[in-house]
Image (cartoon, grey):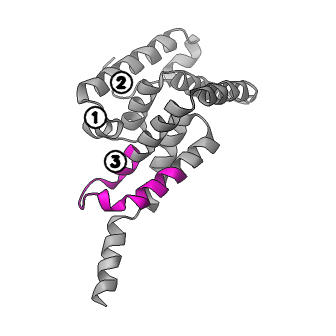
Amino acid sequence: MLRKQGMKRSMARFDIVGQLGSLRRYARSLTRDSTDAEDLVHDALVRAYERRSTFRSGGNLRAWLLAIVHNIFIDRMRSRRSEAARIERAGLVADQSIPASQDHSVRLSQVREAFLSLPEEQRSALHLVAIEGLSYQQAAEVIGVPLGTLMSRIGRARAALREMEEGAPQKARPHLRIVGDDQ
């Protein structure tokens, strides 16, 4: 009986079901492809399960899992640069062939395209802070960079989005707001 209760407590602290949305969103942001994102999340969950003993009790499970997703993505990127380029080209072609029926759909597509056109380092940093709601410190830990580097990447990402926005049609401008920006 005592062993069963201990296992339940152990499993409760390692409950990842509530983290799947964050993992999928982050993986999608990194890979730009829903199928690759699902594969990335699957591989991350397998790795997390295999290395669950390395998770510190009382630690931030979400940040730990996001770091695993990030590290697997980087490993894949290093080993399959040519495949990533092929996927990116296919993703751009697919995005252009989808007809938008309403103005907001068109604008959302433009914002998505602008976000996805950011370099991976900037895109992942901005995603973790603006979409996943991680603190700068947590996001820096997930990516494995110093806090200043993360802040610099976010600043460059925001500046690039702002520059892209200035080139957008006047009617569409008010819909894009750079999260956490002072301007």
Q: Residue furthest top?
A: 167
Mark 1 surroundings within 10 Å by alpha-carbon count, few (fewer than 14), some (14 through 19), many (20 or more) = many
Residue 94 locus on image (x, y percent): 72, 29
In the rendered structure, which amino acid carries the disc numbered 3? Ala
Q: Secondary structure at mark 1?
A: helix
Mark 3 surroundings within 10 Å by alpha-carbon count, few (fewer than 14), some (14 through 19), many (20 or more) = many
Depth order, front residue of 61/54 = 54
Residue that carries the numbered disc 1 in the rendered image: 136
Q: In the rendered structure, which disc, 1 or 3, sits on the residue that comes first in sequence?
A: 3
Name the quarter where the N terminus is drawn. bottom left
Q: Secondary structure at mark 2?
A: helix
Q: Residue at x 58, y 24 (%)?
A: 113
Residue that carries the numbered disc 3 in the rendered image: 63
In the rendered structure, which amino acid carries the disc numbered 2? Ile
Q: In the rendered structure, which disc, 2 or 1, sits on the residue that comes first in sequence?
A: 1
Residue 112 locus on image (x, y percent): 56, 28
Name the quarter where the C terminus is drawn. top left
Depth order, front residue of 77/179 = 77
**The residue stretch that appears in magenta:** 42-67
In the displayed structure, does residue 11 sit left or right of residue 31? Answer: left
Nearer mark to the viewer, of 3 and 2:
3
In the displayed structure, does residue 64 sit left or right of residue 20? Answer: left
Pointers 3 and 2 in contact (C-beta within 8 Å): no
Q: Residue at x 46, y 61 (%)?
A: 17
The secondary structure that most of the magenta stretch takes on is helix
